Amino acid sequence: MGKKHSKSQSELCCDDLPRCGLSNFGNTCYMNSVLQALFFCADFRAQLLRRGSSLEKLLTGAQDFDRIVSLISSLVELFNFIHQGRKHSTTTVKPSKFFASLRSAHAEFAETGIQHDAQEFLSFLVNSVADIERKLDQLPGQKGERLDSASPSGKSKSHAAGDGLVNGGVGDSPSLGESSHKSKKTWVQDLFEVTLTSEIRCLVCESVTSKEELFFELSLDVEPNTSITACMRKLFRMETFDGDSKYFCDTCQCKQEAERRYRIKQAPQVMVLHLKRFRYSESLGDMTKENCRVTYPTTLRLTTMTTKSEPLYQLSAVVIHSGHRHTSGHYFTVVRGADDSWFLCDDEYVERVAEDELAMFFGQTDVQAQHMKDSETSYLLFYERVDETLPDQEQQLSLPLVEASMSEA
């Protein structure tokens, strides 16, 4: 388990706590940590609660979809329990029905006795909600909802549909959590989906091939003593294809040297950043964890290249992993409250923490790694888009980007 917290259950009944704790059924902290982060996402929560019990009624008879319908219906019910529990000072909610539906809906999560990956669970859950909304949109007399129609923040914009989800034609595409939907967009896609443009330029004929790719999250490689801004610069830097990795140019009709760059065309309402801390070790023959230090700001400004806008994001939640292996350890979450205070949610336990305690989860420096056996490190970062400008706090992140210096870390 991760850190033990000293607050008693009676102390958790205070009205200033933003949410309830969630019971752990044995290695379900991966699920609890993501559910807490998503519940705190106001637009996501509001849209789900608007659906209420209508999901099962609308999709009755869709037998191929029954398990996913049951999963999302139980998610709506769980969010209602948490929401009502906050009003009545309930300290803990048992997500037993949701967990049972999850195990039925996906065979991987039915396996007990091991720790599952929080990022994989998040990807499965968000895609499942999007699948439900697409199904609703196909029903006679029904119309899929867009985020604009009932967004508490009123900050989202309608997005144009992309050209598909085929990965880049040369080498490996950047490691990203792909959106699995090509049809008309739903509110889920409006909320989480980021549109990237991949541009490949032949260095012989100068022809440019571009395509759009859609993702629900950005997965970032990590390295010792770095920052989120440096990780994103690395993701969006220019990549050269030469030697054995030359690009087949349709204009030249042969393999040529080429350059590729990814740009953000449409930024999402909620930017989810996944730190790729688990890597395969050939010497060990298994996945190991990178506990290296990766700093992240509480506010982040991002410049997109096509619209020239500069959306500002505010950190709303951090899912943290404690331990050394992806199949063990412990997950918990730190979330931002409505009054900009921060709360640590560790299964049943909820307690207020100071904002500067977020630095505890950056990871280890090289020196610390030599003396510390364990590390509680950030794994998933949720940044919500905001309208107001916070010039004294924000971190600038412009694309295209040059390599970051280590002084940022």
Image: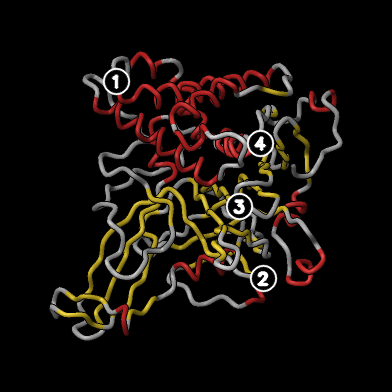
Label at residue 338: 4
Q: Which residue is mark 2?
A: 225
Q: Earlier in the sequence, mark 4 or mark 3?
A: 4
Q: Earlier in the sequence, mark 1 or mark 2?
A: 1
- Left or right, residue 405 beside residue 57: right
- Disc 4 is placed on an element classified as loop
Who's the residue at 61% across and 40% down the image? 114
* Image quadrant occupied by the N terminus: top right
Q: Which residue is mark 1?
A: 62
How far, Cα to Cα, is label 1 from label 2?
Answer: 50 Å
How far, Cα to Cα, is label 4 from label 1?
Answer: 39 Å
Q: Amino acid at mark 4?
A: Ala
Who's the residue at 48% across and 38% down the image? 108
Q: Which residue is mark 3?
A: 379
- Label 1 packing within 10 angstroms: few (<14), some (14-19), many (20+): few
Q: Amino acid at mark 3?
A: Tyr
How far, Cα to Cα, is label 2 from label 3?
Answer: 15 Å
- Disc 1 is placed on an element classified as loop
In the picture shown, does residue 237 fall above or below 375?
below
Q: Are marks 2 and 4 in contact (CB under 8 Å)?
A: no
